[in-house]
Image (cartoon, coloured by chain):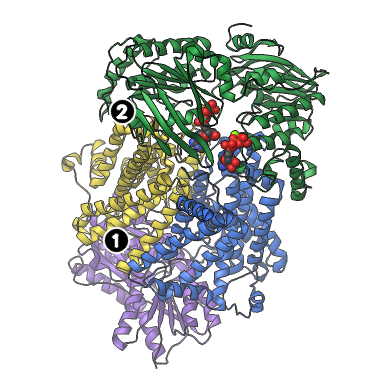
Chain colours: A green, B yellow, C purple, D blue
Amino acid sequence: MRPYHVRLPERKGQRVSQHPAIELVGIDKSFGAVHANKNINLKVEKGTIHGIIGENGAGKSTLMSIIYGFYQADRGEIRIDGKPLDIRDSQTAIAAGIGMVHQHFMLVENFTVLENVMLGAEGGQLLAKGVSGARKELKRLETDYGLDVDPDALIEDLPVGKQQRVEILKALYRSADILILDEPTGVLTPAEADHLFKVLKVLRDQGKTVILITHKLREIMAITDEVSVMRRGEMVATRKTAETTVEELAELMVGRRVLLRVEKGAAKPGKVLLSVKNLTVKDARGVTMVDNVSFDVREGEIVGIAGVAGNGQSELLEAIAGIRKPASGEILLDGQPIANADPARLRALGLAHIPEDRHHMGLVLKFEEYENSVLGYHRDPRYGRGALLDLKAIQADAVEKIEKYDIRPPNPRLKTANFSGGNQQKIVVAREIERDPKALIIGQPTRGVDIGAIEFIHRRIVEMRDAGKALLLVSVELDEIRSLSDRILVMFAGKVVGEKTPDAGEQTLGLMMAGIAA
Amino acid sequence: MEFYDIVVSILGSTIRLSIPLLFTALAGLFTERAGVFDIGLEGKMLAAAFASACVAYVTGNAWLGLLGGIGVSILFSLIHGFASITNRGNQIVSGVALNFVAAGLTVVLGQAWFGQGGRTPQISGEARFSPITLPFVDAMRDVPFIGPLYVHVISGNNILTYLAFLAVPITWWVLFRTRFGLRLRAVGENPGAVDTAGISVTWLRYRAVIVAGFLCGFSGAYLSIAQSAAFIKDMSAGKGYIALAALIFAKWKPVPVMFACLLFGFLDAFANFMQGKAVPGIGEVPVQIFQALPYILTCILLAGFIGVAHPPKAGGVPYTKER
Amino acid sequence: ADIKPALVYGTGGKFDKSFNEAAFQGAEKYKKETGTDFRDFEPTSDTQGEQAIRNFASRGYNPIVAVSFAWTSAMEKVAAEFPDTKFVIVDSVVKLPNVRSVVFKEEEGSYLVGILAGMASKSGKVGFIGGMDIPLIRKFACGYAQGAKAANAKIEVLQNMTGTTGAAWNDPVRGGELTKNQIDQGADVIYAAAGATGLGVLQTAADNKKLSIGVDSNQNHLHPGSVLTSMVKRVDLAVYNAYKDAAAGKFTGGIQTNGVKEDGVAYALDDNNAKLITPEMKTAVEKAKADIISGSVKVHDYMSDNSCPM
Amino acid sequence: MSTASVPLPNWITYGLMPLLNLLVAFFISGLVVWWIGEDPLAALKLLIEGSLGRGDAIGFTLFYATSFIFTGLSVAVAFHAGLFNIGSEGQAYLGGLGAALVALALDRYVPWYVTMPFAVIGAALFGAAWAFIPAWLQAKRGSHVVITTIMFNFIGAALMVYLLVNVLIVPGKMAPETRTFLPGGQLPKLDWLMAWFGLKLGPAPFNVSFLIALVMAFLVWVLIWRTKLGYEMRTLGISPSAAIYAGIPYGRTVIIAMLISGGLAGMMALNPVMGASARLQVEFVGGAGFVGIAVSLMGRSHPLGIVLAALLFGILYQGGADLSFEMPNITREMIVVIQGLVILFAGALEYMFRPAMVHLYQRLKRA
Ligand SMILES: Nc1ncnc2c1ncn2[C@@H]1O[C@H](COP(=O)(O)OP(=O)(O)OP(=O)(O)O)[C@@H](O)[C@H]1O
Ligand SMILES: Nc1ncnc2c1ncn2[C@@H]1O[C@H](COP(=O)(O)OP(=O)(O)OP(=O)(O)O)[C@@H](O)[C@H]1O
Ligand SMILES: [Mg+2]
Ligand SMILES: [Mg+2]
């Protein structure tokens, strides 16, 4: 392993060698049946900030983890500074000067910042020797980059933004020349994100190479030198940022020109069906995630909630769905208070819920398809009498839904895990919509779902609206929100910061989502 | 008998009875801090007791006996590691399985080799760790208060007893003052952090279970060639589980582990002392109450009524990157 | 006549150096004398005892000796199933015509070793450590206490039982710990009536340079110079006689009670403990023996009224 | 490529792999036998003859199997709800108390078939009661049920010894056990069932509780795969987060699953206590609760698999007893070794052969 810090000379923009910092040749990776990276080729030039964009599940994290030695590619070659390097583990990657900030932080929560930074680079068998050196080095990094954190604070006591700093410090402490950041801004406030970008620019100007993964095209345009686009496991294009446009990138990312406009007429809103009043929700650590939020959803309308991931939308949905107990506030369904009802009772009252994460919540992947088609409704008298389940009735019902929603393969006895993502989502959607609920709350309805299925699901959602149901939609895809919603609420830092109509420009909404304008 | 003499006698007994718990609980501390649950402590202790007695009997050397116990105990640890680290099997199931294998194999082999119903022959002399008399015992004997304590509690134990108490600060030092300890604690909380720091999770956890095997070797040897003078079937008699209870009771911290083991040893010693004696006003207290007390205390602790015990976060979960 | 003898041990195991080993010795002696081999079995749990006895019976073994009271109900069942097979149970009574029940007057043997303990003790305190807490073991304790008091009226007898289940016969660690307790309390002679647990008692006494008393078999050789004597219970004779009687066609059922008079219980004196037994002690214990035989001394049997006058 | 997510057909997952695991366990046991200088094949022959060779041998085999069906079902029911109940041993012990109290109370007044239903309820109730506290602690306080059930095994043993030694013992008797039940408190033997197959039961204590065990196996099957409660338990067992989403109450489901598990374990006591020895004895469970873990793992937590695995372990227990009788060098503890190895290979190492299987299967499919 390299000594834990080598101070690099200041090399403003100058190229040391002509080789790219990283070159990937024919990288291929499968997880079982999922082909996450298909024959990827990529060059990242030294001293640049290289953006990588792509939809959820496109394979970005997988590719970066391969470079960092966290996963091993099934095929292909990685060249660092022109030389092929067999990266079998992260140790090799670290030794080659690669540092990575993972999408999900890799920190030991009950350790101090200092311990986390030192982990793996302790500088000797005994801790005592390394500690003072590490303290000094942290101090230096703090002054050089303005990355200040208390070295003796416990990670679990730090806010996420600071935790991310620790991750960056970890990489810098190991004197990484190539820094990979996987969706770093998803958890940052705009101010924090701006600060991060300043740091990245300083790093680049020192000759380091940065790879930045993000969903946000604005960020790509603002900071990167080059940008590569991934779609469904493939690397579809690389562009100089200066020579491309947001529109082109969007098209490359989703593989078609403009997003489908959902055919729908004007909404005919009726009486208020779902009403949220002064709702506050806290997470397990007691941090306020939803802050005094109030709004109504009427019959016959779709209310969309826009916002950057992590601004409280998930918690809001879960609170309404009875999965999370609100700290305070009221939720009314058709005038009835439901803030403390459990999900089973909410279903009985006519509130259906398409959860954000089908694998984690919406489905039991080891169940057969028909068993999932009644999840949550299994106590309904239609599916059995007394204590017993009526499997025949359930299967007949499942077959009906399979036909109606064109779920493939049309086999109710197939294990749910063996359906593709899009078809799995259809199973969930069919179950929740076909119950004919009064109100439906929907999280990320089309995450990781193909275009055909997106269209189908969107159409069903609009049909529900036209049938006079109240729908609440949460999605991090602004386009989806804009094309489906009749009204849009924007959430930022747990608060609803404003309401717009779908005609509001992307710009306006984007600014609101960033907490800049209301 | 003077009250103070009773106290001294019970304390001496407490020490002797808590040593196997202490070694074993420290062993558990290492694996569980590394995120590998180990119900198999009981089996390792038993297997080590058997191996120690066999080797000591054959070679006539207690130290070789200890070595034999350590070797077998580490072998069991490696099987546990192979199942739960390499093959990502269920750690509890693996531990339970090893307890059975140890309980059965010791008797099967013991019977086959010695034909004494699973017992090893009695061992004596050099083959056994005998009590050591510390210097100044005679001079101290008549010193009031401290004297009896020194003579009957501090002196007169075998070498393994002193090693057990030495193991406590060493464990603390290793866990909190060395690189190995830092990494070990980290891997029990978030193996991903260790992995991405360029450290092999597998090898680290293997080292943790090997250390546990090493320590269980001592507890086994203590049972068969220090505390008694032969292996007897099932001689661990649930001590592995009590050690586990002590570990939980001590919230996975070395010094509290020592006190928890002393407490449980004391309960045992006190039960022995109280046996057949009547408590004024209550009458004879059933020994079963003392026998059950460590378990009851542990349940109360687990229920969070006296401070919640948080096990290492990644404990019990095999580390997988690819789903 | 040729016989096919079998032997079922108690759960302490064949080589407990005590009760079961005595039974084994008896069978070995018969084998040596007659050349007739025997089959034996060591059950490790209660359910196994019954199966073993039945296995022997159904395979034509005869006579079948089962040592330990633990097989009482098993014997009741199996002996009834095989009325033509001869059975012997030791330490318990089964009232069937084809069963011989051999019981011992342990109180008498314990009385004798109690006298030796009382005389050998310098501290005026002697100890008793029993195995499982059952009337049979209290009987040992009671006889011992009577003997010790007879030798020294002011003597204090400390008593402990190892446990309340079968595991108490096999727990030398606890045995040792209880011994240490008694030593700490001042006892300098400790009598173990605890099966394999007694090994821990004798060991601890030797480690602490105190005297101990063995039980059932002659255990004097285990720690020469530390084992004062042993209360020998002639289980070996019970086994040996059963085989011999059966071979000679003289096997009888019913209850056989063996006391000092019948030489069924005794104290052991051999080279290993010769130095520990002073002439005065020898005289005293021999006198007690004679008194018991003559009936002028009557040792109270705990099991006769479930109480001990001490 | 990782093989973890490649699906395999059921006949491999539920047929071939357990069989393979079992074979490895047996192979290693054979090595142990060979190591101690005996002939493994001869031993195997004795084991099979001793367990299946005669009517009474089969009777004993089925007697042991009966206990293992109960404890296997007990472990499996908890397992389906994602709980690892190591406490079947203690729950069975307490169940014995329930059965014995019923038998002692009724045997003088009524025939066995009147006593039986009450005894079943008594045994189940006491077993369930002993599972309740660990269940409650898991449900409401988050204490890990594995640790608490282990603790409760020991607490239960202490309690039972206390009761037997101080309360239930027949005064003056040596062994701490209750009085012998009259026929009204005994479960009759199944001689007639054996006679159907032309076998003589002899003294083997194969009794009516076997039929109760089979009924329970069927009921457990219905519970797990045909009832709403079973559906909820399985959901919770596979995906706790999906269970929350579906509104399945965690606490209630955990407690009910553990109560059923404890009840099944408790019923095991009917077999030895009322079916065989007709009295309550110390340590009568004799490890059957732990065998239940092996049986459940081996049987892949399916009642049919459990019945088959229980038979296998019945063969091991009876055959092993006979084997140790014929070959004194191989003690009965050999079956404990085999049991441990089965748990190791069928449980902890169940996926050891999976990658190889996947490769083989894929090659087969391609060919
Ligand atoms: N450890 C894993 N085991 C199995 N499958 C995985 C694993 N990691 C990722 N996948 C699958 O590989 C595909 C690519 O995932 P990856 O995390 O690389 O996507 P991503 O582009 O980073 O998406 P996101 O924007 O949501 O982070 C997905 O289908 C995902 O389900
Ligand atoms: N978690 C999983 N476990 C097992 N198999 C899976 C899993 N996820 C996906 N698969 C398998 O991988 C195949 C491809 O899944 P994936 O979700 O990548 O499909 P897709 O190409 O994205 O399809 P769609 O367009 O419908 O989303 C599925 O048909 C399924 O058999
Ligand atoms: Mg990602
Ligand atoms: Mg997909």
Query: Mark 2: which secondary structure?
Result: helix
Q: Give above or below for C250 relative to D135.
A: below
Q: What residue is disc 1 on?
A: C152
Pointer 1 local density, CA inside 10 Å: few below 14, some 14–19, many at least 20: some
Which quarter of the frame holds ligand 4?
Answer: top right
Percent coordinates x, y for residue B281 in the rendering: 50, 44
Q: Mark 1 — on which chain does it sit?
A: C
Q: What residue is disc 2 on?
A: A95
Percent coordinates x, y for residue A261 in the rendering: 71, 21
- Left or right, D75 with respect to B115, comes to right
Q: Quadrant of the C terminus of chain C?
A: bottom left
In this orientation, which residue lies closer to the viewer: D279 or C62?
C62
In this orientation, which residue lies closer to the viewer: D200 or C36?
D200
Front label number (1 vs 2): 2
Percent coordinates x, y for residue C117 in the rendering: 28, 63
Q: Give above or below for A75 relative to C202.
A: above
Pointer 2 local density, CA inside 10 Å: few below 14, some 14–19, many at least 20: some
The type of residue carrying mark 2 is Ala
Q: Quadrant of residue B60?
A: bottom left
- Ligand 1 closer than 8 Å to label 2 CB: no
Give how far apart the Cα atoms at labels 1 and 2 are. 84 Å
Query: Mark 1: which secondary structure?
Result: loop
- Left or right, C187 with respect to A329, comes to left
Is residue C16 among what the camera can see? Answer: no
In the picture as drawn, the residue positioned furthest to the top comes out as A517
